[in-house]
Amino acid sequence: MTELLRQMIAQIEKLPADQQDVIAARFLAELQDEQKWETRFAATTDDQWDQMAAMVRQEITEGRTVPLDEVFPTQK
């Protein structure tokens, strides 16, 4: 176990049981979601990646995309 994880657990242990359960449920859900994504990415074939890239290039060509800076403006 990492030191950071130990610190997090120590802080969570100070909370009431119901709050601990809420946090634990959120972390478990996040871990399950991450495992699903890892499995899905690992199962994606090169042909599927190529097809997705072609779709993105087509959307860009057709002007159906928004520049990333418009979605997440940089702070100055």
Image (cartoon, rainbow, N blue to C red):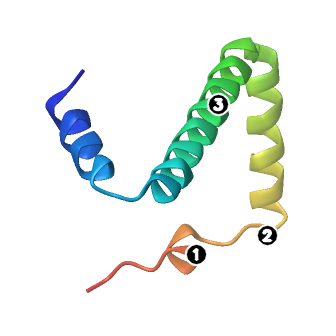
Q: Position of residue 42 (x, y in %)?
A: 66, 14
Q: Residue at x 85, y 64 (%)?
A: 62
Q: Residue furthest bottom?
A: 76
Residue 29 located left or right of residue 45: left
Q: Amino acid at mark 1?
A: Val
Give the secondary structure at mark 2: loop
Cβ atoms at labels 3 and 1 below 8 Å apart: no
Foreground mark, 2 or 3, reads: 3
Of 58 and 34, nearer the camera is 34
Of 36 and 19, nearer the camera is 19
User: Circle 1 sits on which residue?
Assistant: 71
Q: How far apart are the alpha carbons under marks 3 and 1?
A: 28 Å
Cβ atoms at labels 1 and 2 below 8 Å apart: no
Q: Residue at x 81, y 22 (%)?
A: 48
Give the secondary structure at mark 1: helix
Q: Is residue 67 above or below residue 19?
A: below
Of 29 and 39, nearer the camera is 29
Q: Which mark is residue 63?
A: 2
